């Protein structure tokens, strides 16, 4: 059985997975391995056996997860992720403007298609605190990390992910949300400040599409 029910493709586990069991942060799946010899790993595992909980269980889960990836992914972990090729003509956005969402969504598709049976993947894509210069125009490369370029990268990454999944689309639902809201009115710096209004985007073949909103009259 898969020792990982959920994976954060970041350096830390997000708050949405706080307290969840069978969960690990794996920011670079291609390098998800023990960085040493088999003898060194054996010594480390032996040392952990003399520790107490929750450290002991966490160590066991990590080593078990490393082995699960290595033994179940075609060609092993490093080979599988390093040689992964998106399917169905999917083209993920590159990192030329400093956005890594394309690479991370590529890893997400690879995990889903690797037959690992991981139920939940979480991804962070930051930089949305647009108190100023909320430019509506997508700038050509190098462009810069303004809102329009950022939202375009997000849209392109989601489209590529959906195309890449192919027949697995019916098994995957994507939720995009922010941890805090924004105001509707523009401030004096051509941006928007923190507010109570917020939104979420849900994508998947099992989603009943449309715009759903509560009866909020004052944001």
Image: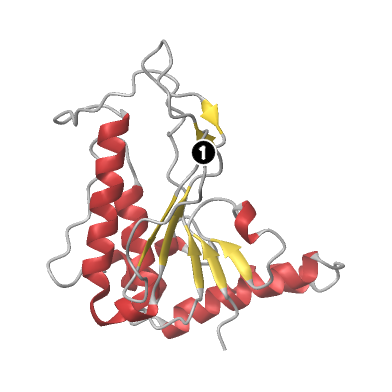
Residue 105 higher or lower than 163, as above or below? above
Residue 159 higher or lower than 80, as above or below? above
Badge 1 density bin: few <14, some 14–19, many ≥20, Cα 10 Å: few
Q: Residue at x 47, y 77 (%)?
A: 69
Q: Is residue 37 visible?
A: no
The answer to which of 138 and 201 lies nearer the viewer is 201
Q: Residue at x 81, y 66 (%)?
A: 54
Q: Is residue 133 visible?
A: yes
The quadrant where residue 91 appears: bottom left
Is disc 1 placed on a helix, strand or loop? loop
Q: Residue at x 17, y 64 (%)?
A: 90
Q: Residue at x 62, y 73 (%)?
A: 63
The quadrant where residue 167 appears: bottom left
In this picture the colour scheme is: secondary structure
Residue 151 higher or lower than 133, as above or below? below
Left or right of residue 1, residue 171 in this image:
left
Residue 32 percent across, percent down from the top left? 48, 65
Residue 78 percent across, percent down from the top left? 37, 68
Left or right of residue 103, residue 174 in this image:
right
The answer to which of 109 and 213 lies nearer the viewer is 213
Q: Quadrant of the N terminus?
A: bottom right
Residue 138 percent across, percent down from the top left? 19, 31
The answer to which of 22 and 191 lies nearer the viewer is 191
The quadrant where residue 55 appears: bottom right
Left or right of residue 74, residue 1 in this image:
right
How many marks overall? 1
Question: Farthest residue in the bottom direction?
Answer: 1
Residue 31 higher or lower than 216, as above or below? below
Residue beneath disc 1: 197
């Amino acid at each position: 059985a898969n020792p990982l029910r959920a994976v954060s493709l970041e350096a830390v586990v997000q708050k949405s997975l706080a307290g969840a069991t069978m969960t690990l942060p794996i920011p670079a799946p291609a390098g998800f391995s023990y960085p040493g010899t088999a003898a060194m790993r054996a010594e480390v595992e032996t040392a952990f056996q003399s520790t107490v909980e929750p450290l002991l269980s966490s160590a066991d889960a990590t080593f078990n997860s490393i082995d699960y990836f290595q033994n179940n992914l075609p060609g092993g972990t490093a080979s599988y992720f390093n040689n992964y090729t998106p399917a169905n003509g999917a083209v993920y956005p590159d990192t030329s403007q400093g956005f890594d969402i394309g690479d991370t969504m590529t890893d997400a598709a690879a995990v889903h298609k690797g037959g690992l049976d991981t139920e939940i993947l979480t991804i962070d894509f930051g930089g949305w605190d647009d108190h100023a210069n909320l430019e509506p125009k997508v700038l050509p490369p190098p462009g810069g990390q303004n809102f329009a370029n950022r939202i375009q990268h997000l849209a392109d990454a989601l489209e590529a992910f959906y195309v890449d999944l192919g027949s697995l689309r019916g098994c995957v639902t994507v939720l995009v949300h922010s941890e805090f809201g924004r105001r509707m009115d523009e401030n004096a710096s051509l941006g928007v400040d923190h507010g109570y209004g917020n939104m979420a985007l849900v994508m998947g073949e099992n989603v009943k599409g449309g715009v759903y909103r509560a009866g909020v009259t004052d944001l």
